Image (spheres, helix red, strand yellow):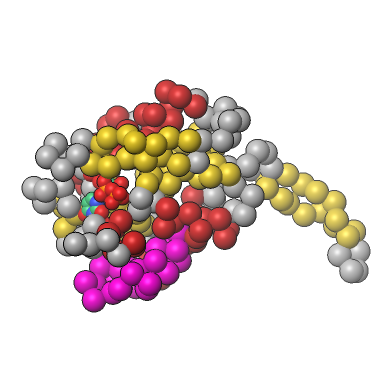
Amino acid sequence: MGKTIIMEHPLIEHKIAILKNRETGSKLFRELIDELGMLMAVEVTKDLKLKVEQISTPLMDTEVKMIDGKKLILVPILRAGIGMVDGFLNMLPSAKVGHIGLYREPETLEPVEYFCKLPKDTEDREIIILDPMLATGGSAEAAVRFVKERFNPKKISVACIIGCPEGLNHLREKHSDIDIYIAYMDEKLNEHGYILPGLGDAGDRLFGTKQ
Ligand code: PRP
Ligand code: URA
């Protein structure tokens, strides 16, 4: 059984409060998603394996610990997941980045795939799927399913900034083996599949495309 981590931290609460505010414009929204990505990266990488290395400080030789093993692959779900990539890359500058394009069909809310490109050597790597919103959970569930079926990685984690019980339950029910990280758990879904109180449409607020 994978881990389910709901992060609780005053910095996260504060940044989410500004993110949710309808008065927050795209520039600040992007900066906050970036900062929340960095905070999430610290938690998501907590179990990375370390190896001992010998180095010399200016005063003496010593043993230090450094990250072991192959690099991670970050996989943002387009569009809104792109907003989290830079925050994660700030903490994991050598990570590779793949992309999965999904949109929710407006009537059924079912995820529809329109793009998928991942680096080649996925089998002994860990994949971290990024999406700010876990609403019905359909997009994250489909992304995990595609990655499992086509790329067979060593491990899959999903990192979402705002989640709700419905989305978390759906994702966990379909994929008991993955690790799920949610920075902030919101109240519920509305009948249109939006998180309440939520922040509205994350992609539109990031990229300023609201009509
Ligand atoms: C949003 C969001 C997630 C998805 C979450 O994307 O970025 O990918 O909805 O909803 P779900 O959990 O119910 O699947 P959207 O489909 O609006 O596309 P966009 O990022 O291009 O705006
Ligand atoms: N996608 C969003 O961007 N916001 C929601 O509240 C739900 C899905």
Q: Could you say where residue 29 lies in the image, as x and y percent from the top left?
A: 35, 68
- From where the camera sits, is residue 178 visible? no
Q: Could you say where residue 92 lies in the image, as x and y percent from the top left?
A: 59, 53
Residue at image point 34% right, 61% down:
207
Q: Is residue 93 above or below residue 119?
A: below
Is 15 colored magenta in this rendering? yes
Outermost residue, left side: 191
- From where the camera sits, is residue 53 visible? yes
Relative to the observer, which residue lies in front, 205 or 168?
Answer: 205
**Is residue 190 found left or right of 93 in the rendered image?**
left
**Is residue 149 found left or right of 173 in the rendered image?**
right
Residue at image point 12% right, 40% down:
107
**Is residue 118 found left or right of 200 in the rendered image?**
right
Chief secondary structure of the magenta portion: helix
On-image quarter of the N terminus: top left
Residue at image point 33% right, 69% down:
26
**Is residue 176 found left or right of 210 in the rendered image?**
right
Relative to the observer, which residue lies in front, 96 or 72?
Answer: 96
Q: Which residues are magenta?
A: 13-37
Q: Could you say where residue 210 lies in the image, as x and y percent from the top left?
A: 22, 62
Is 126 colored magenta in this rendering? no
Relative to the observer, which residue lies in front, 156 or 43?
Answer: 156
